[in-house]
Amino acid sequence: MSEDVQTAGAYAYPLLIKQLLHTPFAQAQDQEIVYRGQVRMTYATLRERIAQLANGLSQHGVQHGTTVAVMDWDSHRYLESYFAVPMMGAVLQTVNVRLSPAEIAWTINHAGAEVLLVHTDFIPVVESIKDQLEKVRTFIWIDEPGSEAPAHSIAFANEYEAMLAASSTRYEFPDFDENTRATTFYTTGTTGLPKGVYFSHRQLVLHTLTLMAALASPVAGQRFHRGDVYMPLTPMFHVHAWGMPYIATVMGVKQVYPGRYAPERLVKLIEDEGVTFSHCVGTILHMLLTCPQSKATDFSKWKVIIGGSALPLGLAQAALERGIDVFAGYGMSETCPVLSLAQLPPGAEALDADEQVRLRCKTGFPVPLVELRVVDDGMADLARDGKATGEIVARAPWLTQGYLNNPDASAQLWAGGYLHTQDIASIDPTGNVQITDRLKDVIKSGGEWVSSVEVESLISQHEGVSEVAVIGIKDEKWGERPVALVVLKEGVAVNEDEIKRHVLAFSETGRISKYAVPQVVKFVEALPKTSVGKINKKGLREQFV
Amino acid sequence: MSEDVQTAGAYAYPLLIKQLLHTPFAQAQDQEIVYRGQVRMTYATLRERIAQLANGLSQHGVQHGTTVAVMDWDSHRYLESYFAVPMMGAVLQTVNVRLSPAEIAWTINHAGAEVLLVHTDFIPVVESIKDQLEKVRTFIWIDEPGSEAPAHSIAFANEYEAMLAASSTRYEFPDFDENTRATTFYTTGTTGLPKGVYFSHRQLVLHTLTLMAALASPVAGQRFHRGDVYMPLTPMFHVHAWGMPYIATVMGVKQVYPGRYAPERLVKLIEDEGVTFSHCVGTILHMLLTCPQSKATDFSKWKVIIGGSALPLGLAQAALERGIDVFAGYGMSETCPVLSLAQLPPGAEALDADEQVRLRCKTGFPVPLVELRVVDDGMADLARDGKATGEIVARAPWLTQGYLNNPDASAQLWAGGYLHTQDIASIDPTGNVQITDRLKDVIKSGGEWVSSVEVESLISQHEGVSEVAVIGIKDEKWGERPVALVVLKEGVAVNEDEIKRHVLAFSETGRISKYAVPQVVKFVEALPKTSVGKINKKGLREQFV
């Protein structure tokens, strides 16, 4: 090792998740963490419970390298697991509880989980798969007060609260290599089996600090700061709820965990607890805006980042009309997840309202340390002119090394030394990124690329439209033609022609190609969703092909 | 290596200074960097000039591991060196130009610098020491337009702007180990020879991201954000100007570099360029507030962090009266430097004005990742009651590994696995830190510890006092007794007794011990300053003992 490289010594400081806790536990001891409005505890209690959870899990044989799987709704318990499990040197598997029982069993086996924490509501699922679980030797029951456990034959070794009550509030979390795996979970791929992604302590710490810096640094509005009240609306099993619980904890802000996402409960928590910062997929925001319980809700202090898929202009406008400070973020399971944020740059307050809405809906500006390129098939950079489109490839310190036990898919993911997102985008001269499509959702019609995302965004602005999805169907003459599946607002009558004319009007102003006008507009009752709440385009294509 | 530790691969992403530039160079290309109001350039030009500087230095034989020393005032050239030199894999030595010529020669030799960049103003110094420089083989002249070079016999190999003009604007900065040394500079220790401290790429990147997150995340005010205009007022040779130029660059904000610190120029730049964020030692702020040129200046958009030594209450009040959003920060050369910031926590706006000023003057809250302890002689934690005082020891990812080529001092610095600051402090139950003294400045009088910092802060509030320093002098009866050296405001008449009664009044309310009332108050014309602008207590003690 050359002389200019510092070697380990007293000064060495590995980037471990436990290091995130020095400042909040010293400075925010009395700050609150709220679960469903029913449980209230302080950060001082969180500190003790993290130690109790670690001691309890140690008693059940969890050690460095053990995988601990959790099946729970969004809760303070999940937050405790986010810290205690990796801080012990174990690996936290956040189980996607919306998958089918067979898929759940497959992911738990594939991750090699040995311990499984099960909320009462998931006892029936676990009962149905328990004989298929290959390595799980310890089941721990999460008993939700007030909910009754159904009959089952699972041999629970302990109950979560009883385990904590019997455990010491002190635990010496050890130092170890910062590249140690901390978490793993499975992407709900559109093809084939779910794929496991995984993140190290170093990666989660760097994602936390950088995203905190990015979220806090705008001039005003659209920012997550120390005075906020945080509530996740992307499930905690899904990419660590975008890593936001780690950021909220470092900031020492009040945190609210809603349990299962019932609209009336979410609205009530936003009102009662004064929630000011959340993040979700567009469909959840759409649900909250349209549910009867929110008719009179004051949303004017609420900031919401929309991710998972594009933020349609129509939804953004509807949210802004309710006073919600809404903007888009971009990332994916493989990227921990955040790569970019659609923040308004300094000076944007001078732009007209429409332009501001458009900026809020963009894929946005990459956060620090993210090297984001839009490239052609040969990995050459395309012009940053806001027009040329190609695949987004990225480097950042927090991207999954690959897919768990899947070297072929991993090699493909990292072909050429960059992570391939399979998203098609352009970058404008200000560095603002705009995704136009998923690689596999792109519609090629009459030799032109049609952006399903763009057409959806335009249709979403029609006053009668509640939700929309655009897919390509094969066409002999044009190759592919776009088809729009539209859910109308309640009590509204709109016909196919009106939607087509609405899009045609944009093609006449040059905003979009005339090939983008849907061949067919179908009105449907609802759009199918994936397990993480995105519109299931794969399902739609299967249905309409 | 165990299976749960991720090994290097395509995903590997070393924390190198060059990675800080991905986002500002993509997103802030048209943003300005201003030097003295005379040179204006964009980030796009900065990008090119960094490459040109690297190419130019390569031509002069700079390679991985070469130490490049710089003697310049605060400038865009220094900013270019902050990036280009370490990004090549070379080491940047920021020479403290306020040291004596002999000390400067000693530091350049001790660091092993082979290349020396010299601003015109420092030609006389370099002329006087050039025969003592052991390893410097290349001198590069920084020719300041409008200033004339004195006669000299230095064989300059090139001139900075000519070198850049002759060099390509493209340079492929390589990847290397993130623990590679990036910078080195010398602390102006109060005893013995200067000591070299040094920081790696990883350390500077982590300091940058974490401090950006900490500075940006307050609710309002007192925060550094994307709409700010930045100007350093701690010299760039001193702890990378607190690392702020790196943060300003990542944020993509307008940056203003003032050259030499002449009060009239600083005031004019604040006015003309709309500077909103700076940092300095208290003596510089005091100079700016009291200089005739600033009488009519509107400072109401200016945020200033005071560090280097305590922020006296009187100075804070004077600054607040001028509309300056002033607060304290804490750190030292050995700590890269920032450990804590005296930000107002959420809810502080409800406190009375006096309490808010006191909070602004505190040592403050440690920034994320900083583990800060106040310990007794046996390294046991003291109570966090705001009363118990002991030495501050710290861990963070950005603390110097030790003193360059000085294993004894390094071992002492890191005794017990924590960096010893030699600052005496208490921590209150909210995690707020208050330094009461330097270990060697503590006054022990009548068996009680008297905080020279606290006495200075109280005397600074007397309406006739411009500056004050308190030191201990030996006393047969009491062990030590405090002596106050006071500079009065112009045209004000105050006598010794009035100052003593002013302090005595605080002791009667229990705010301070009666031993704290100075034995002697001496009125002086000015207080001696160290090379970085702090009051030179060592010099005062020598003078008065």
Image (tube, coloured by chain):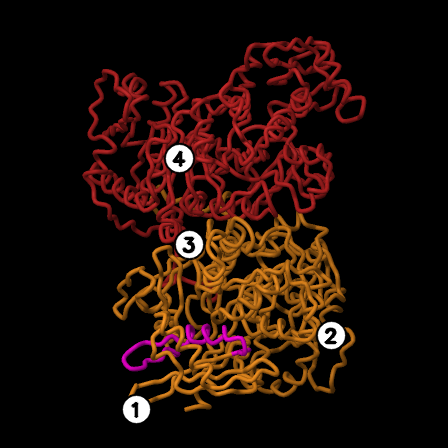
Chain colours: A red, B orange
Give the residue at x 49% y 78%.
Answer: B188
Depth-wise, is mark 1 or mark 4 nearer the camera? 1
Q: Quick one: label 3 or label 2, which is nearer the N terminus?
A: 2
For badge 1, the amino acid type reads: Glu
Residue A439 screen position, x and y as percent: 61, 27
Depth-wise, is mark 3 or mark 2 nearer the camera? 3
Residue B124 or residue A75, whichever sits in front: A75
| Chain for numbered disc 1 | B
| Chain for numbered disc 4 | A
| Chain for numbered disc 2 | B
Give the residue at x 44% y 27%.
Answer: A268
Q: Which mark is residue B369?
A: 3
The residue that mark 4 highlights is A184
Vertical order, B44 against A365 (above or below): below
Marks 2 and 1 sit apart, C-alpha to C-alpha, by 58 Å
Q: Residues within 10 Å of mark 4 (few under 14, many from 20)?
A: many
The residue that mark 2 highlights is B143
